């Protein structure tokens, strides 16, 4: 049985470990991840100073790890200061199922626990890659969690990449289950080479994205309200034991009189992403999506002229196996380069991120 002191020590050590991130000592995987992450910030929020990129990256990864610990530590009193969660709203879902739309922000995993604590039967839509991870979590973390908290977990998983995922969702809703969906996961969507027939093109920051709108169309078809819920994490100086977790229940989305399924799906999906864009522009360190949002961006497919190597702001470097690359941030084009050129440009391209820059 963990003591309060050991739990707090674990949380402090988690935060401390990510504060030491240094690109000069990064693994190949992390260096590549940082390169594309930096391109995403460069293109979507170009006014953000590049000198803050590493700190946002550190906080983003610390937040990812803490989101697991938050669920593990939720039954322990006085660990998390949770505000804004509407318990009456959650209790109402037991009798009036809905689509709960949330995002990969703040302590995004904690909503599973809070819904279970409220006795809400729900189905969680997850990507194929996360499906096995969530299965394992249910068998280990959540089993232990519900025993400690003395609650019953009625959560089923749905693989979003299965051909009949929408049909399974509809059947679950008709059985009285609410649907929990992380809309910014944009599961199954990779824009490159895809026909936009079933995708909606939206503005996101200063870029354009192709996103799925099937969830909103399903809500219209089944007559279910969409309840957007956004989670935010913030250090709380007045809270002795760590972080404050704040929930924001945004206005529910319902069809207007005589609004078609097509029009509602467009309007609801645009609204949900506009809410996310507003939040992450204000608090970019809160959103995990910076690591993979480039997969959903609509990029110019026309041939580009030779990029300007004289402007280091436009470039990132990374390694993969025994190869070295330059990533052109504006276009996301990658160029294999000799190791000598990689070492030459590593310092030039990353000069924003260090005060005592030197090449590796």
Image (spheres, rainbow, N blue to C red):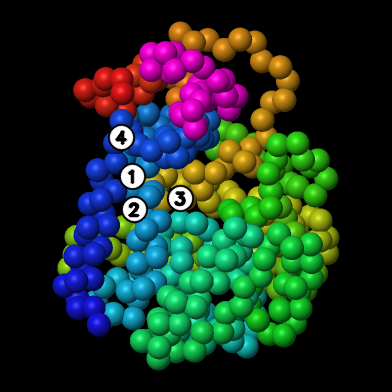
Label 1: how many Cα within 10 Å (few below 14, some 14–19, many 20+): some
Q: Position of residue 111 (x, y in %)?
A: 47, 71
106 left or right of 220? left
Where 338 falls versus 95 (above or below)?
A: above
Q: Which residue is mark 1?
A: 58
Give residue 87's quadrant in the image.
Answer: bottom left
Q: On the rendered image, what quadrant is the C terminus found in?
A: top left
Q: Residues within 10 Å of mark 4 (few under 14, many from 20)?
A: few
Image depth: mark 1 or mark 4 in front: 4
Which is more toward the observer, 60 or 22?
22
190 left or right of 222 in image: left
Residue behind mark 3: 287
**Which residue corresponds to mark 2?**
62
Tell whether label 4 touches label 1 (CB within 8 Å).
Answer: no
- Mark 3 or mark 2: which comes first in sequence? 2
- 1 or 3: tag closer to the N-terminus: 1
Q: CA distance from mark 1 to mark 4?
A: 14 Å
The kind of secondary structure element at disc 2 is helix
The range drawn in magenta is 318-344
Badges 2 and 1: C-beta atoms under 8 Å apart? Answer: yes
Classify mark 3: helix, strand or loop: loop
Residue indicated by mark 4: 25
């Amino acid at each position: 049985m963990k003591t309060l002191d050991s739990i707090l020590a674990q949380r402090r050590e988690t935060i401390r470990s990510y504060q030491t991130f240094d690109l000069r000592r990064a693994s190949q995987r992390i260096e590549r991840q940082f390169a594309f992450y930096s391109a995403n910030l460069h293109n979507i929020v170009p006014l953000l100073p590049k000198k803050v990129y590493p700190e946002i990256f550190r906080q983003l990864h610390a937040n990812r790890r803490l989101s697991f610990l938050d669920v593990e530590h939720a039954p322990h009193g006085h660990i998390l200061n949770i505000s804004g969660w509407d318990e009456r709203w959650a209790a109402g879902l037991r009798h009036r199922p809905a689509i709960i739309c949330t995002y990969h922000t703040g302590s995004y995993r904690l909503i599973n626990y809070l819904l279970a604590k409220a006795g809400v039967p729900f189905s969680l839509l997850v990507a194929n890659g996360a499906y096995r991870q969530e299965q394992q979590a249910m068998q280990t973390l959540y089993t232990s969690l519900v025993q400690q908290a003395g609650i019953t977990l009625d959560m089923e998983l749905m693989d979003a990449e299965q051909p009949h995922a929408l049909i399974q969702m509809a059947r679950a809703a008709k059985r009285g289950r609410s649907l929990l969906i992380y809309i910014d996961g944009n599961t199954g969507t990779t824009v490159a080479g895809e026909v936009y027939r079933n995708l909606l093109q939206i503005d996101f920051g200063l870029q354009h994205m192709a996103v799925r709108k099937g969830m909103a169309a399903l809500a219209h078809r089944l007559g279910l309200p969409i309840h957007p819920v956004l989670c935010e994490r913030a250090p709380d100086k007045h809270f002795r034991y760590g972080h404050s977790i704040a929930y924001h229940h945004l206005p529910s989305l319902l069809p207007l009189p005589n609004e078609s399924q097509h029009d509602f799906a467009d309007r609801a999906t645009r609204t949900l992403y506009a809410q996310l864009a507003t939040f992450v522009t204000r608090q970019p360190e809160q959103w995990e999506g910076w690591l993979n949002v480039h997969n959903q961006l609509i990029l110019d497919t026309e041939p580009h002229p030779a990029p300007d190597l004289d402007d280091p702001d436009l470039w990132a470097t990374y390694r993969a196996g025994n190869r070295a690359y330059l990533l052109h941030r504006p276009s996301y084009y990658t160029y294999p380069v000799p190791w000598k050129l990689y070492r030459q440009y590593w310092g030039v391209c990353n000069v924003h991120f260090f005060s005592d820059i030197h090449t590796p």
